[in-house]
Image: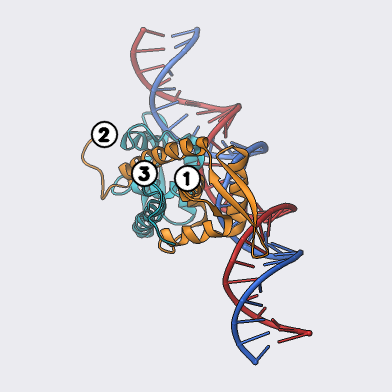
Chain colours: A orange, B cyan, C red, D blue
Amino acid sequence: MKPDVLRGHLDALLLATLDGRRLHGYAIIEALQLRSGGALDLPTGTVYPALRRLERAGYVTSEWSTVSGRQRRTYHLTKAGQRALVQERNAWREFTAAIEGVLGEGPWPAQA
Amino acid sequence: MKPDVLRGHLDALLLATLDGRRLHGYAIIEALQLRSGGALDLPTGTVYPALRRLERAGYVTSEWSTVSGRQRRTYHLTKAGQRALVQERNAWREFTAAIEGVLGEGPWPAQA
DNA sequence: GCTTCATACGTAGCGAGTCTACGGGTTCGA
DNA sequence: TCGAACCCGTAGACTCGCTACGTATGAAGC
C-alpha cells in the first residue's frame, strides 16, 4: 500500500478503533492489523503523534497506568470524539462515492 | 471534503478519466466534477502538475492542438497507463476493504 | 548473569504531493 | 468595452504520515 493513501483517513481509523473500547497505543496498532486483515501495519511514529493530535483536539483523553512495571497510556473517546467519528464515517462514504463514480468500470457512456 | 483525502488517489482518478477518451486538462476537471456529482472540484494547480507527473512516468502522452485560436494540450493513455489503471483499481479495492474492516459499524465484537 | 525478543513509550526531521495564489492569453456575448 | 468562460501553467507553502532513532521493562533461554 502506498504511504500517502492514508492521508486524512488516519483520524477516522483511530477513532473507530477506540469506539467503545479503552486501548493503549501499542494495542491500537495491533487491533488495526487484525481488523484490516494485515493490510494496515502502522509504525509507532505514525500512531503516537496522531493520538496526541486527537487529544489536543479534544477527541480522546488518556490516563497513565502501570501494568506489571510497564507504563501504559490508555486512550478512550470523548463525547466530541464520538461525534467526530460519526462525521468521519459520513465523510468516508462521500469520499468513496465520489471516487467510485470516477473509477467506475470502463470508458464512459456516450454523453458529455 | 478535507484536502488531504485525495492523496495517492489522484493518479487513479486521472487515469480513469482518460480511459478510452482524449481530453485536455480543463475538460478533465469538468469531467471529474460531473462524474463525482460535484464532490470533486480540483484546482488547476492540482491537475496540471499531476498530468505532467503521469507523462514523465510514461502513463499518458499529450499533443498540442489549436481549437478556434485556443491552444490545447490533449492527453491520452499509453499502454503502460492502462496497465497502471488496472493496478490502481486493484489498489483502491484493497484500500477500501482495509479501511472498512476498521470503520465497520459500532464497537467491536467480544474478542481480542 | 547475559543476551535477546516482545512489549511499550516517544521525538526529530524528511519528503511527497496537494493546495493557494498568482500570471498569461483567447473568444464571445452583453 | 468589459466581463465571464475557456485554457494553459508555475512558485511556494503547508500538512502529515513515514523513517530512523532513542529509552526502558519483563520474560525466556542458555
Sequence-earlier tag: 2 or 3: 3
Helix or strand or loop: what does disc 2 sit on? loop
Circle 3: residue type: Thr
Sequence-earlier tag: 2 or 1: 1
The quarter of the picture where the C terminus of chain B appears is: bottom left
Indicate whether A4 appears above or below B34: below
Identified at 45% across, 47% down, the residue is A20
Identified at 50% across, 49% down, the residue is A14
Task: Report which quarter residue B71 is drawn in.
Answer: top left
Q: CA distance from mark 2 to mark 3?
A: 23 Å
Question: Dot 1 falls on which chain?
Answer: A
Res A12 label: 1
Question: Dot 3 falls on which chain?
Answer: A
The residue identified by callout 2 is A112
| Horizontal relation, residue A105 to residue B2: left or right | left
| Horizontal relation, residue C8 to residue A11: left or right | right
Pinpoint residue A53: horizontal percent, then vertical percent: 61, 43
* Visible residue check, residue B45: no
Tell which tag, 2 or 1, sits nearer the viewer: 1
Nearer the observer, D30 or C12:
D30
Nearer the observer, A87 or D3:
A87
Sequence-earlier tag: 1 or 3: 1
Pinpoint residue B20: horizontal percent, then vertical percent: 28, 48
- Confirm whether circles 1 and 3 share one chain: yes
Q: Residues within 10 Å of mark 1 (few under 14, many from 20)?
A: many
The residue identified by callout 3 is A96
Res B48 label: none
Helix or strand or loop: what does disc 1 sit on? helix
Identified at 41% across, 30% down, the residue is B70
